[in-house]
Image: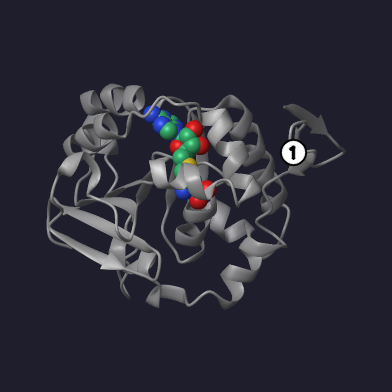
């Protein structure tokens, strides 16, 4: 893997797949989803409790390529992303920087769309000492085993998996998230998968391939 720094764009070159990836909020697939993606009616929006008059703050503790966080931010949530991979963090920061130069996206950045390069378990443990910072919602999208198989199809996910490694700390993330979030924890799962850590959610919201397990702490 190699990072390539252009004038304003940072790309990650994967030598094995001979492909480049970058994160682009302003044009491409994410921007298209922003424009045509179903707004607050989509499952992820319902899962975090977005309603008119309620834009919960979200801590996305598994930022990855920032797709889910971007959807929530464009729908009005103040979103903080945490990503422990320094390489992915550089791609995220670069996407935020480019978005901040676009008139359409400046307000989204200003409403509090930002990223932190940290291990989320350590971050939450540090923040627990100062719980005035607690977000309404913590969002977890672990690298589940089924994702590893389907990653053979999707290049982006294959690259993410290699950067992520085999260290699955999602059970600990759920434990810590439940101690820290004010209102709910949302875990993204494949529709047929067992709940994370076999811990039954209070409720779930399903789309075609994905299920969002919701652990309620306080009603919204
Ligand atoms: C499946 S991906 C998330 C994909 C993301 N939802 C998206 O839309 O692109 C999981 C990401 O979580 C990150 N991750 C896993 N454990 C973490 C931790 N303890 N702290 C911070 N990031 C973590 C991995 O490095 C990986 O990038």
Q: Residue at x 57, y 29 (%)?
A: 163
Q: Is residue 111 visible?
A: no
Residue that numbered label 1 is attached to:
17
Q: Position of residue 219 (x, y in %)?
A: 12, 60
Q: Position of residue 174 (x, y in %)?
A: 24, 38
How is the protein colored in the picture? Answer: one colour
Q: Position of residue 201 (x, y in %)?
A: 15, 53
Q: Position of residue 80 (x, y in %)?
A: 44, 43
Displayed quadrant of residue 26:
bottom right
Is residue 124 or residue 144 the one in the foreground?
144
Which quadrant is home to the N terminus? top right
User: From the viewer's perspective, is 182 left or right of 77?
Assistant: left
User: From the viewer's perspective, is 10 left or right of 220?
Assistant: right
Displayed quadrant of residue 87:
top right
Indicate whether 86 appears above or below 108.
above
Label 1 residue SS: loop
Task: Determine if the C-beta at disc 1 is less than 8 A from ligand 1.
Answer: no
Is residue 72 or residue 131 the one in the foreground?
72
Is residue 91 or residue 135 the one in the foreground?
91
Pick out the residue farthest to the right.
Answer: 7
Q: Residue at x 22, y 63 (%)?
A: 204
Which quadrant is home to the C terminus? bottom left
Mark 1, other Cα within 10 Å: few <14 / some 14–19 / many ≥20: few
Q: Is residue 202 visible?
A: yes
């Amino acid at each position: 893997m190699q990072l390539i720094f252009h004038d304003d764009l940072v790309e990650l070159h994967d030598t094995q797949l001979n492909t480049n990836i970058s994160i682009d909020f302003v044009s491409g697939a994410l921007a298209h989803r922003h424009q045509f993606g179903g707004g607050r009616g989509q499952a992820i929006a319902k899962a975090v409790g977005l309603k008119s008059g309620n834009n919960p703050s979200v801590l996305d503790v598994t930022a990855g390529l920032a797709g889910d966080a971007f959807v929530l931010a464009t729908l009005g949530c103040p979103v903080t992303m945490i990503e422990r991979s320094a390489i992915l963090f550089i791609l995220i920061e670069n996407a935020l920087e480019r978005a901040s130069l676009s008139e359409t996206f400046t307000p989204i950045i200003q409403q509090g769309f930002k990223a932190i390069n940290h291990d989320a378990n350590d971050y939450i443990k540090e923040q627990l000492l100062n719980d005035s910072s607690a977000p309404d919602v913590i969002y977890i999208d672990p690298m589940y085993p089924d994702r590893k198989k389907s990653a053979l199809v999707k290049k982006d996910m294959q690259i993410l998996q290699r950067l992520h490694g085999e260290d699955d700390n999602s059970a600990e993330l759920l434990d810590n998230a439940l101690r820290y979030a004010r209102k709910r924890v949302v875990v993204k799962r494949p529709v047929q998968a067992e709940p994370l850590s076999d811990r039954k959610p209070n409720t779930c919201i399903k789309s075609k391939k994905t299920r969002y397990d919701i652990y309620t702490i306080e009603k919204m």
